[in-house]
Amino acid sequence: MTSTPGSPDLLRQLAEAVGAAHVLTDPADVAPCVHDWRGRYRGAARCVVRPGSPAEVAAVVRICAEAGVAVVPQGGNTSLCGAATPDASGDAVVVGLGRLNRIRAVDALNHTISVDAGCTLAAVQDAARAAGRLFPLALASEGTCQIGGNLSTNAGGVQVLRYGNMRELTLGLEVVLPSGELWDGLRALRKDNTGYDLKQLFIGAEGTLGIITCAVLKLFPLPQRTTTAWLNVESPSAAVDLLNRAKNAFDAQLTAFELVSEASLGLVLRHIPGTVRPTAPAPWYVLAEFSDADPAAVEAWLAGQLEAGRVADGALAASEAQAKALWALRENISEAQKIEGYSIKHDVAVPVSRIPDFLAAADAALAAAFPGIRVIAFGHVGDGNLHYNLSRPGDQDSAEFLACQPAVNRIVHDAVHALNGSISAEHGIGQLKRDEILRYKSPLEMELMRSIKQALDPRRLMNPGKVL
């Protein structure tokens, strides 16, 4: 069962607000909106509503609030934590934001872009590029994920090292509050010290405090040239050492520095057609990007690292097509692991210097507790964010493997916590880690979060069952 009938009066009011064609009740239409990308969560909904403007979003939320009906905001539905999936009760209304897809304004002079929440990340990147500017958020799902979801999870991606995550990239927001009121905070100021920075309440809140409908985002000069390198390294320690040397040599020109294990690369080569190993096999690899650095200087620096033995082998992209092929090896890891079968995913952050310590501790503890478990580790070593995923041993049943998730989580998250890290770096909490944060956040932190939720959404109708 994927949906339950909504009350005729509620459906009528929603249809009057957004048009009957944009209130979906047929099970075939609702089905894609009640399960997550990974296939781990499946729920039900009264209907799916597709408003076409912020005013229509406000009307939908107001109607649902008056009826006491929960609302689940949904963007591109690429969540890895079940944050955009309704529960199984069938009581909620899913609000799809895909029709809010206008690029409202590109201000190249002030380096800003104003976009509706339903714009895909790729569309925002393209609009910035057309104006000779860069919007630097870069994710593997950029053709599908939407800006509202990027904001709601405080997405990071591969260029946080240089440009920061969505908190740093956002100047202003427009938000529909749980009451149905529309808050206009679309300020494009770099400095605004007039009280609480309210926009930060909604960034990373996963739709539990309101629905983001528009954002003013920062733009940057468009790099005139990039140099992309795939490098073989012996260990995570060697990768961290290489990172620090690269930062010292190139500073802000180093815009990405990704770590990929041989196990991760192996899945991509096995499952993604057209992928090719760029260098000889190694235990670990670094994918580094340099923007507006002299290519000759990068090549000379890399030659020095090879001569010193810090890099065992490497490949420099000689064209944009080759650079895209190298990035495809990194960006297709999640897709390859999905094809491989169910996995237990972790999106963690530790201080950059402690990445080797975390990997050593977690790998050893998991190998002892679950012989044969396969570690698929990769991520943004430049900012300390690792995607530490586990695949089942080859002969283990999927259901048996997933039953181990609580024990696996405890091992991984305890190792993160021991290093003063975070159990969620950029994917959010959603349903997946809702109970886990109770173990790692202090009672005072949890009470402060609940107080904010109570103040803005006392009836707990906004994306219930997520985060808190």
Image (cartoon, grey):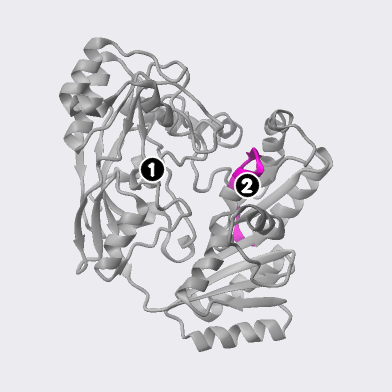
Question: Looking at numbered disc 1 in the image, what kind of residue is underneath it?
Answer: Gly
Classify residue 392 by image quadrant: top right
384 relative to 422, above or below: below
Q: Nearer the viewer, residue 280 or 225?
A: 280
Is 65 left or right of 282, judged from the image as shown? left
C-alpha gap between disc 2 and disc 1 = 23 Å
Identify whether 187 is placed above or below 434: below
Judge whether 467 appears above or below 127 on screen: above
In this rendering, position of residue 190 left or right of residue 292? left
* Identity of the residue drawn at 47% across and 23% down: 43
* Residue 149 tag number: 1
Q: Visible in this render: residue 346? A: no
Pinpoint residue 85: horizontal percent, then vertical percent. 45, 30
Question: Element at badge 1?
Answer: helix
Which residue is denoted by mark 2 in the rendering?
337
Residue 302, located in which quarter of the rendered image?
Answer: bottom right
